[in-house]
Amino acid sequence: MPKVLISDQLSPAAIDVFKQRGIEAVVKPGLTPAELRAIIGAFDGLAIRSATKVTRELLDAATNLKVIGRAGIGIDNVDVKSATARGVVVMNTPYGNAITTAEHAIGLMFALARQLPEASASTKAGKWEKNRFMGVELTNKTLGLIGAGNIGSIVADRAVGLKMRVVAYDPYLTEARATVLGIEKVELDTLLARADFITLHTPLTEQTRNILSRENLAKTKKGVRIVNCARGGLIDETALYDALQSGHVAGAALDVFEVEPATASPLFALENVVCTPHLGAATTEAQENVALQVAEQISDFLLTGA
Ligand code: MLT
């Protein structure tokens, strides 16, 4: 019977799938790297979220490992090159949390437009500052999507429903797909010049790192509001801080940070910044989806090699 180690907090739905498929699942979240190295040799599969770091050292000890399944999208916590070199397949679940993450981006856009976290804190503090919180409407505003894949296209769909004009920069977006989505495909500089709101929906790669660099932030429309639920590292945080301080950028909502966990940042001191602790995929529905999907995928691979 193949054995799978679940080394992060995963919905119990995954364990049921493994059981039904005749695979032994051992649940051990929160192990130290040394503890993980000590036991990994006994397993054929490894199911993770983002906490487990699959390093070259761990893979050296994983003498029976055939497959690593990431319940989620990003595989930044896996040394894919080392895994591939050892013949270990790395898989993710690209669809299970896409709606949830898109909804978080839309939620953060509303939070920025109406300063909801600040207004809530002020009201709870008994201040009733009705004149302090003048917002802006989303209707008829231009949303610039950087990345129009699984998540970006759901954001586009919701934004079109909100009567926003949507422009997208994505080298993989075809004109035909843009037409179906009811959005306009544009070059990055055009997006930067036109967008009232910018949301990011790309993985962090050498091509996308610092896509909102100091230089590109300077090309944005004055008063732009920026939402990042994708990956820290897509925005130059120091340049963003300066642009927020100067008022060129009116607000930023950040779910992800260059260094996570982000427990301290100069950005936290700014009133026009809304922050959440990488909650993009944090709904019960999404976590159940990704757990089920990763368990099915790992089972298929271990039982049929497909
Ligand atoms: C993902 O890559 O699936 C999301 O960022 C969620 C997460 O890492 O928890």
Image (tube, rainbow, N blue to C red):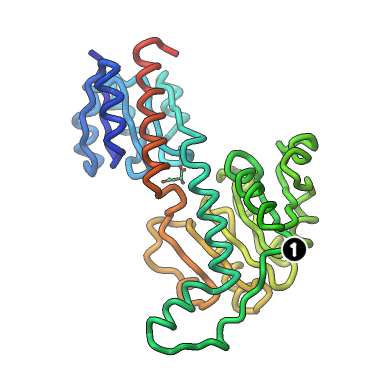
- Where ligand 1 lies, by quadrant? top left
Tell me which residue sits at (37%, 38%) in the image: 288
Quadrant where the image shows the C terminus: top left
Residue at (41% x, 56% y) in the render: 260
Foreground residue among 110 and 28: 110
Residue 121, position in %: x, y? Answer: 42, 78
* Quarter of the view holding residue 278: bottom left
Q: Give the quadrant of residue 131.
A: bottom right
Q: Is residue 136 visible?
A: yes
Task: Please state the horizontal and vertical placement of residue 114, each as a whole percent of the image.
Answer: 57, 73
Check disc 1 and report its element: helix, strand or loop: loop
State whether residue 146 is above or below residue 76. Answer: below
- The picture quadrant where one finds residue 35 is top left
Please say if 229 is above or below 134: above
Q: Residue at image x 60%, y 70%?
A: 113
Q: Is residue 303 positioned above or below 59 on the image? A: above
Quadrant where the image shows the N terminus: top left
**Quick check: 10 left or right of 246?**
left
Q: Pointer 1: what residue?
A: 140
Residue 57: x percent and y percent?
32, 33
Q: Is mark 1 within 8 Å of ligand 1?
A: no
Question: Does residue 232 appear in this view?
Answer: no
Q: Mark 1: few, some, or many residues within 10 Å (few <14, many ≥20)?
A: few
Q: What amino acid is found at the position of numbered circle 1 in the picture? A: Asn
Is 156 on the left-hand or right-hand side of 192?
left
